[in-house]
Structures are given as C-alpha cells and as structure tokens.
C-alpha cells in the first residue's frame, strides 16, 4: 500500500473511529481537477478521497474514464493532503493496476456486484493482498446477491470490508435516481452487524439538492458514514454532474448533519414507554385483523375454485386499490405507502387462493370453510346477489387518484417513521 493511511479503519479498526466520510469526484478527469478538489476538500472532515478512473457507463460513447493515468493523479492528490484514496475496480486488470499505483482502498461498483462471475474474478485477484474493499449494493434490490459478493470477497482473505448503500435502479420518472429502499440496508445490518455500512446519497439522489436530506436520513438510521461525490467545478464534470457538489457545499452538509444515539437515555420517559405499549397493542391488532382478512380470502378462494373463477379479478383489485388509497389520503397517510402495503396484501391473498385451488391449503378450517362457502353461494344463486364484481362502478377511478406526485414523494423524504 502507498503512503501511511491515517484513519483508524485502515489500520483495521473502524469502530474506534467516528463516522467514515468518503468524498471526491465521480471521475478523475485531470491532474489539476483532482488536486484542486482534494486540496479544497481537506478543509473539511474527510476520511478517504474517492475518484473513478474506469467509469461504467450505461450507454457507450459517454465519458468512460481516463484509465490508468488517473490512478497517478488520484494518488498524487491524496499524498498532497495526506489522505488515503479509493477507486472502483471492476476486473482483475483494474485490481492489479490499483495495487501497482498504491491505491489504498478499492470499491466494487453496483453493476459489478450484480454479477457473481465478475465479483469472483476480483476476489481471486485479491487473494493474499488484504487491501480494504468497499462493496456497493447490486443494481437490483436483491440482498442475497449483495451478501454473496461480500462472502466472495471475504473468502479471498479480505479482512476490511465496508458496505455501501447506493440505492436500487428503477424504471420511469421517480424522485430518486436510485430508490433507497431503506429496509434492505436495515436488514443487511441486522444480518451482518459487525460490518461497517455507509450510505452514498449522491447516487441515490441523482440531484445535488436532495443529497443533504438523504445523508441526514442515513445518519438517523445509524449508518457508519457517507460517500459523497464532490467536484471542484460540478457543472463542468464529465460524469454525474447533476449530483456532484462543490467542496464548500460538502463542508456545509457535513457541518449541518445532526447526530443521534441508537440507545437514547438509559431511562425512557413515561410518555415514550406508553407510546411504545400502544404501538405493540396496535401491531397485535393489525396481525389479528390480517389473519381475519386472510380467512375471508380463503373462503372466497374456495368459491372461486368451485365456480372455476379466475383468482385475479382485475376490476375488484382496481376498486380496492382506489378505495384504500383515497381512504388513506383522508387520514394523511402516504398514498405510495398504502399502495405498497395493499399490493403485498393482495399478493399474499392470491398465494393463499392459489394454494386452495391446488388443494394445498394448510388451513385446518378448510373443510368447514368449504361447507360454509358452498352453502352461502347456493343461497346466492337462489336469489341474493353478493360479490358480483362486474357490477362495481369503476368509472374515472384512476383519473381521480393518480400515483403520488414527485412533490408529495419529496415531502416524505424526511419521515420514514421507524419507531
Ligand atoms: C460511482 O461511485 O461513481 C459509481 C459508478 O457508483 P455505482 O456503482 O454506485 O453506480
Ligand atoms: Mn458517479
């Protein structure tokens, strides 16, 4: 490794240190740009300087990085300010070039983490080296794929691994360039509590103006640090110009961050204890209600099987979705939250009815329910008319309730409501 790294983590001890801040440009563009950015950054709290030299671009023809010579500029800039440097390595040739140039830390990018073949080749190139490696999440929200990459690098003998949450790619116009889906890094932390986990709000946001809020959200969720894209002249950056900030802006973000403690005071205030009790009771009720709802679903499933009716009823589903979203908005719940919730409930309902159809229902009440349902619908045929989905009035439902606007999503940025 190159010049003596100063940060505790690089000597094998992140937990003894404070937050871990990685900052620097998306791409190393020139000797001057790299040096200027590092010099300006060194006025603020930074642990590690970043800069990509081989850039994974979605489409060919855009700037693909300056290649090997960028490693020299990156390392020079780090030496000038006495900080270690990091770059992305996507194959064994990159790993070897980085080791030759004295790069202190490598990172595996999101596109690479998505491919077990590519990660394994990098792991093989890392055997016997033990350079610190940051592993970004894969492009798609697949926690097992992320863990698989971590295991491959760990098995190669790498003892210093940092995980980087940079969001998950999506389709269509959304507030974020990459969806944060916070429950995935939260679950990762639960499963791998000993590994440091940092957040890359720049790649999550895709827009510089959103970075502060997401950085704060990550700190509130007890991430161990941040990776932020910083460029001495963001507007003329050759890659990701919209999401990069100036060193001075970076300094403001770091200064404004508000830190929280995971434990809170040893003695909880009475009001918090009461609220937590109330939440426990509400959750119990929610589970009981869900179980009751699924019982109804199962009964309907028996009717569908007996009458040879499709499990999925598009009109009924559309009506449920519209109705629940309208109701939730009246109660100031986020429409997208309720939509996701009911999509999950509906999926489980279809699974249950699928098992009923296949004769795999695990429920002991199945026979009893079957008898009830047969009788109920016998009555139905004889006169009463329940559950006729064709009669639902669906006119204009979608027009009345479009998906939540970007502004509304934005308004939700700060509140993800973990208790
Ligand atoms: C980057 O950090 O510049 C980069 C390309 O990141 P990701 O792999 O997260 O897209
Ligand atoms: Mn970038």
Image (spheres, helix red, strand yellow):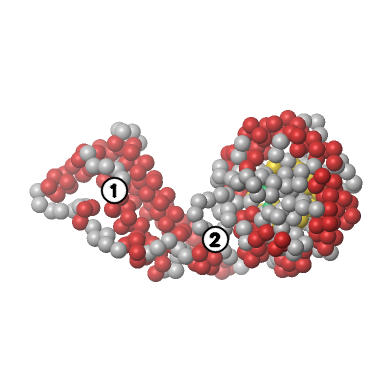
Q: Nearer the viewer, mark 1 or mark 2?
A: 2
Tell me if 174 is positioned left or right of 356 in this view. right
Front in this rendered view, residue 234 or 322: 234
Contact? badges 1 and 2 (CB < 8 Å): no
Could one spot residue 3 in this view of the protein? yes
Name the residue at 62% across, 61% down.
207
The secondary element bearing badge 2 is classed as loop
Find residue 133 and report its horizontal and vertical position in percent. 74, 42
Image-quadrant location for residue 318: bottom left
Query: Which residue is denoted by mark 2 in the rendering?
Result: 175
Name the residue at 64% across, 47% down.
61
How many other residues sit within 10 Å of disc 2, few (<14), some (14-19) or many (≥20)?
Answer: some
Image-quadrant location for residue 38: bottom right
Front in this rendered view, residue 260 or 322: 322
Q: Is residue 148 above or below residue 180?
A: above
Q: Is residue 224 above or below residue 145?
A: below
Total marks shown come to 2
Image-quadrant location for residue 179: bottom right
The secondary element bearing badge 1 is classed as loop
Could one spot residue 195 in this view of the protein? no
Q: Gap between marks 1 and 2, in whole Å?
A: 31 Å
Query: Which residue is denoted by mark 1 in the rendering?
Result: 313
Name the residue at 60% across, 51% down.
167
Q: Which callout, 1 or 2, points at the residue further toward the start of the chain?
A: 2
Name the residue at 53% across, 51% down.
170
Q: Quadrant of the C terminus?
A: bottom right
Find residue 111 and report its horizontal and vertical position in percent. 63, 42
Tell me if 119 is positioned left or right of 314 in this view. right
Front in this rendered view, residue 278 or 303: 303
Front in this rendered view, residue 216 or 27: 27
Q: Is residue 413 above or below residue 352?
A: below
């Amino acid at each position: 490794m190159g010049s003596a790294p100063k940060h505790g983590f690089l000597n094998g001890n992140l937990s003894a240190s404070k937050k871990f801040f990685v900052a620097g440009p998306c791409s190393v563009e020139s000797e001057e740009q790299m040096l200027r950015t590092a010099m300006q950054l060194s006025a603020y709290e930074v642990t590690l300087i970043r800069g990509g030299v081989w850039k994974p671009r979605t489409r060919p023809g855009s700037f693909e990085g300056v290649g090997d010579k960028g490693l020299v500029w990156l390392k020079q800039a780090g030496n000038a300010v006495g900080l270690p440097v990091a770059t992305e390595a996507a194959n064994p040739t990159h790993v070897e070039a980085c080791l030759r140039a004295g790069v202190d830390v490598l990172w595996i990018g999101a596109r690479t983490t998505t491919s077990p073949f590519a990660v394994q080749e990098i792991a093989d190139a890392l055997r016997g080296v033990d350079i610190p490696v940051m592993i970004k999440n894969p492009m798609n929200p697949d926690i097992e794929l992320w863990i698989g990459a971590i295991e491959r690098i760990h098995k190669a003998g790498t003892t210093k691994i940092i995980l980087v949450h940079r969001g998950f790619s999506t389709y269509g116009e959304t507030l974020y360039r990459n969806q944060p889906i916070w429950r995935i890094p939260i679950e990762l932390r639960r499963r791998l509590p000993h590994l440091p986990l940092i957040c890359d709000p720049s790649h999550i946001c895709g827009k510089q103006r959103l970075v502060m809020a997401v950085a704060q959200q990550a700190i509130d969720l007890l991430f161990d640090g941040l990776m932020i894209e910083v460029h001495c002249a963001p507007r003329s950056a050759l890659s990701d110009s919209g999401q990069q900030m100036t060193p001075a802006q970076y300094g403001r973000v770091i200064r404004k961050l508000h830190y929280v403690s995971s434990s809170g005071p040893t003695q909880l205030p009475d009001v918090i204890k009461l609220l937590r009790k109330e939440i426990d009771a509400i959750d119990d009720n929610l589970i009981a209600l869900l179980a009751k709802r699924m019982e109804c679903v199962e009964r309907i499933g028996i009717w569908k099987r007996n009458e040879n009716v499709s499990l999925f009823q598009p009109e009924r589903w559309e009506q449920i979705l519209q109705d629940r979203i309208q109701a939730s908005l009246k109660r100031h719940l986020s429409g997208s939250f309720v939509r996701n919730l009911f999509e999950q409930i509906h999926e489980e309902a279809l699974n249950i009815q699928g098992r009923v159809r296949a004769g795999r229902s695990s429920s002991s009440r199945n026979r009893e329910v079957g008898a009830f349902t047969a009788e109920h619908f016998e009555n139905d045929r004889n006169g009463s008319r329940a559950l006729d989905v064709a009669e639902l009035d669906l006119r204009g439902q979608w027009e009345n309730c479009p998906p939540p606007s970007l502004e509304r999503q934005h308004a939700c940025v700060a509140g993800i409501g973990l208790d």
